Amino acid sequence: MDAGVSLAGALGIPSIIVGLTVVAVGNVGAGAGDGGDVRRARMYPILALGNVLGANIANLTIIVGVAAMMSEVRMSRATQLVNFPALLAVFGLLLWMLLNDRQVSRKEGVALLVTYSLYLCALVFLAAGLKK
C-alpha cells in the first residue's frame, strides 16, 4: 500500500483521491489477504455486515476525530460535492437492500461492486479535472 501511495504522489494524483482509492482498498485488502475475512463472511454473513458498519462508524468518528485533533481536516468543495453524496447514496442503496427483504442477494452484491466501479470512474474523472 505504501508503494501505491508513493507512486500516486509522484504522478501528482491529489491526496484525497489516494485516500479514497489506494488507502481504502488497501485497508479492505489487508483484512481479506489471508482469506480469513472471506471465510468468516461465508460462515457468518451478519458478522461481515457488522464488520463493515462498525469499521465505517469507527473511521468516521475515531480516525477523523484523531486526525482533526492533530491538524485541521480540510477538503475541497469538489470533493465534498462528489464524495458525501456518494457515501449517502451507497448507504441508502445498502439500506434499501436490507429493508426490502433483510438480506443482500448475489445480484445485489454484484450491483454493489458495479456501484463501486462507477464511483472509481467518477474519481478518475475528478482527479483529471483537479490536475487541469
Image: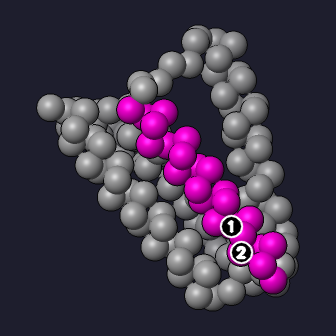
Count the numbered circles shown: 2
Is 130 rendered above or below residue 90?
A: above
Camera-side residue of 82 and 64? 82
Mark number displayed over residue 94: 1
Residue 74, how many percent across, how many down? 51, 19
Is 119 rendered above or below residue 129?
A: below
Q: Secondary structure at mark 1?
A: helix
Furthest toward the bottom, the residue is 106
Camera-side residue of 82 and 8? 82
Residue 119, how many percent across, how many down? 42, 57
Dot 2 crowding, Cα within 10 Å, few <14, some 14–19, many 20+:
some
> Which residue is rendered at x = 56% and y = 72% of the image?
112
Please identify the dominant SS of the magenta region.
Answer: helix
> Which residue is rendered at x = 21% and y = 42% of the image?
128
- The answer to whether 32 appears left or right of 62 in the picture is left
Picture quarter containing residue 106? bottom right
Q: Secondary structure at mark 2?
A: helix
Q: CA distance from mark 1 to mark 2?
A: 5 Å
Q: Which residues are magenta?
A: 78-101
Furthest toward the left, the residue is 132
Residue 114 visible from this viewpoint: yes
Dot 1 crowding, Cα within 10 Å, few <14, some 14–19, many 20+:
some
Residue 67, how many percent across, how many down? 63, 21
Query: Disc 2 marks which amino acid?
Result: Met
> Which residue is rendered at x = 29% and y = 50% of the image?
124
Camera-side residue of 96 and 112? 96
- Residue 79 lies in magenta, yes or no? yes
Residue hosting label 2: 97
- Residue 88 lies in magenta, yes or no? yes
Query: Disc 1 marks which amino acid?
Result: Leu
Q: Is disc 1 in contact with disc 2, using a CB cutoff of under 8 Å?
A: yes
